[in-house]
Image (spheres, rainbow, N blue to C red):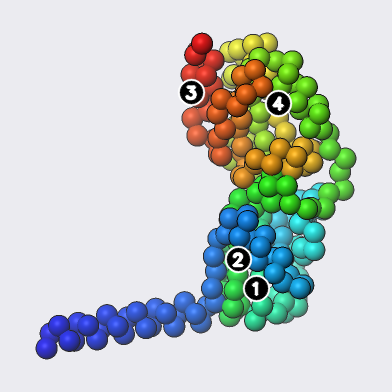
Amino acid sequence: MKNKKLKFSLTAIVFLVTIAVFSQGQSANLLLDAFYAKVKSQKNPQIIDARGSDEFGLNHIEGAVNFNLKSDDFEKRVIALNPSKPVFIYSIAAYRSGLLAAELGKRGFAEVYILEGGIASWIGGGKPFYSNLKTKLTLAEYNKILSENQYVLVDIGSRYCATCKTVKPILESLRTQYGAKLKIIEIELEESPQVIADLKNVKVFPTLIFYKNEKIVFKKDGLGDLKNDVDTALASK
């Protein structure tokens, strides 16, 4: 008898949780290829750039609209969406897009998808994007730097990325320690989006790549223990 009651209770809990989840809509983080495929499957995809207006003005996914929870016209923007159709959201990382996705879920939107890695993943994966900038660094110039220097450390990020800012003092320390032996390149999305797209190997900000004789020794998606990794790479023969 006790087992039957326990079984009934567990079934009831699962049922209630299921109702709660579906009443708030479905939300999921998707990697680039899955996100892109779902976007392309829609005739008029609802894409939201959850970054600030200044970020959006520099570059964004083509067809995206720009707003987030702090936008003055937030309610107007939400009303303009169709809650029965998928909504695709991205930002720099997952914070602003995650908050927006959660709010749309509470409002009954059926499907809400967040791009894992945000705009870094989209542009870094070579997908089409809008930019009002002429890239500061070209791929040809990038490759020329690699060919002219034995050791090169590349820092790829955005001025709007909080984690990216923590990389800067480490780079300065490495410059002081190694001098001309180590060439350091800093690439920002806001200055050179096209070279990030041309590299086709950036998934998140920051991305750190260490080269020796034009060959990648290591690539880091995120900061990690950068100084130790560089020290180890330069100490090896």
Front residue of this view, candidates 170 and 70: 170
Is residue 151 visible in the rendered structure shown here?
A: yes
- Under tag 4, what secondary structure? strand
Give the amino acid type for the residue marked by disc 1 in the picture. Answer: Pro
The numbered mark, 1 or 2, whose residue comes first in the sequence reads 1
Could you say which is closer to the camera, residue 111 or residue 214?
Answer: 214
Say which amino acid is labelled 2.
Answer: Tyr
Q: Position of residue 29 (x, y in %)?
A: 55, 60
Of discs 1 and 4, which sits in the foreground?
Answer: 1
Marks 3 & 2, CB-CB < 8 Å contact: no
Considering only vertical position in the picture, is 176 above or below 221? above
Q: Position of residue 106 (x, y in %)?
A: 55, 76
Label 2, on which residue?
113
Q: Amino acid under label 4? A: Ile
Sooner in the amino-acid sequence: mark 3 or mark 1? 1
| Residue 198 position by quadrant | top right
Q: Which mark is residue 185?
A: 4
Residue 155: image quadrant is top right
Residue 86, disc = 1
Where 201 sits versus 113, above or below?
above
Tag 3: residue type? Asn
View extreme (bottom): residue: 1
Indicate which disc, 3 or 2, sits on the residue closer to the N terminus: 2
Q: Is residue 2 left or right of residue 74?
A: left
User: Mark 1 near mark 2, Cβ–Cβ under 8 Å?
Assistant: yes
Labels 3 and 1 touching (C-beta < 8 A): no
Check whether the beta carbons of the residues at disc 4 and disc 2 lie within 8 A of each other.
no
Give the CA distance from mark 3 to mark 1: 44 Å
Real-space Cα distance between discs 1 and 4? 39 Å
